Image: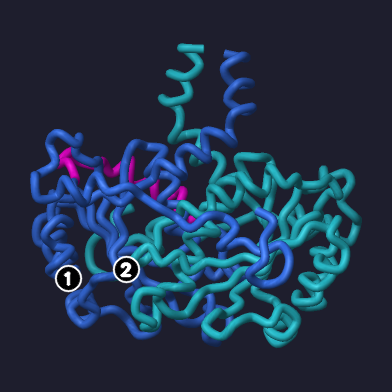
Chain colours: A cyan, B blue
Amino acid sequence: MENHSTNTTQNLDQIQLELLKKRKSPVAFSDKEVSKEQLQQIFEATRWAASCFNEQPWRFVVATKAQGAHYQKVLNGINEHNQKWAQNAPVLMLTFAKKTFDMNGQPNMHSWHDLGLAVGNMSAQVTSMGLYLHQMAGIVRDNIQNTFDIPEGYEVVSAIALGYKLDFENVPEELKARESKERSRKPIKEIVFDKAWGESSF
Amino acid sequence: MENHSTNTTQNLDQIQLELLKKRKSPVAFSDKEVSKEQLQQIFEATRWAASCFNEQPWRFVVATKAQGAHYQKVLNGINEHNQKWAQNAPVLMLTFAKKTFDMNGQPNMHSWHDLGLAVGNMSAQVTSMGLYLHQMAGIVRDNIQNTFDIPEGYEVVSAIALGYKLDFENVPEELKARESKERSRKPIKEIVFDKAWGESSF
């Protein structure tokens, strides 16, 4: 045990990097359920994110497939294109940002950014649990506003599908191309400038 | 080795949660340097975040203390209140969001949110490396805009100080209260609703 825990500490940065790189947004979810305990752990990770003045402007409406009507309400807030695959996810969420600060009612320009920080935590946590999430900008804002009677001062930002992904051999034919598409990102030198803007030694 | 790697996999969710909960925003940084290789690893983690249409709207200007004038320029973009402690950090950054999509020039309402996702990755990675970051909303936008001649279409969002934190016994007296302040967050039931808005079984 001693050795294990020392080893783990030494390699923590490599483990973390592998997890963050492994993350992807599947379109083919398994019907395997995500338990209440797992959700608890996921939101425990989520809530410890940093935020401007510790406002914690993030809110989540979450639904599991077992909830039936409530799940359907959340699904109805997602656009048709995304509903096609998202309807198989065992968990669906809607994310919201609080527009003003509790302490003084002034606008919080960082609310969407800070929600992003919280979902960043969520994303790292679910990956460590063997789970995947897929965030969607394609939502039906009016539908969500009306269905959930969102109080003034909150904006819906995105939807999230959460679950286990299907093994590739079980992915439906029509989703196989999308699911196996190679992920790509800009190289570091295009996003990190250590001299003037646009100039990078990376 | 077999055992170690199995063990690690089993406990990955606990390791991840501990890292995310351990994260804090120090005000007392050690002068220990952060290497180019470490920065490389940090930005490698950062760039793999998800984003709307894979736009990757995040940009970073980064400066190490060893760079002298460039570091000073970044420091000058931070407000006086934050400069007092941030000037001890071995690395300073400014973060930016690209306002429109590359593919069609349309406004990207998720740009700040997606920058938050990327900084979420950054935050998890630095914690796994024994490093800490402290994000600041308190910046001087005009100064940054002018100093770095930021091209149209990008907005500065925040500054970040990065480094090792001082052991508590070495924290200057005037920062000790702030550095030892207990961190707090809303309970899950105040941010996660699994029934109607505001109603939670968590």
Q: Residues within 10 Å of mark 2 (few under 14, many from 20)?
A: many
x 38%, y 58%: residue:
A189
The numbered mark at residue A159 is: none
x 60%, y 82%: residue:
A151
Disc 1 sits on a residue from what chain?
Answer: B
x 12%, y 69%: residue:
B80
Vertical comparison of B69 with B141: above or below = above
Residue type at mark 1: give it.
Asn
Lower position in the chain sequence, tag 2 or tag 1:
1
Q: Calculate the distance from the C-alpha at mark 2 to the C-alpha at mark 1.
A: 11 Å
x 67%, y 61%: residue:
B200
The part of the chain drawn in magenta is B29-48
Mark 1 lies on residue: B79
Mark 2 lies on residue: B158
Residue type at mark 2: give it.
Ser
Residue B15 on image: x %, y %: 52, 33
Q: Nearer the viewer, residue B75 or A50?
A: A50
Vertical comparison of A107 with B181: above or below = below
Q: Secondary structure at mark 1?
A: loop
Question: Would residue A22 be found to the left or right of residue B26 on screen?
Answer: right
Residue A114 on image: x %, y %: 45, 66
Q: Main secondary structure of the magenta part?
A: helix
Quick check: is B46 in the magenta stretch?
A: yes
Vertical comparison of A12 with A122: above or below = above
The answer to whether residue B57 is visible is no
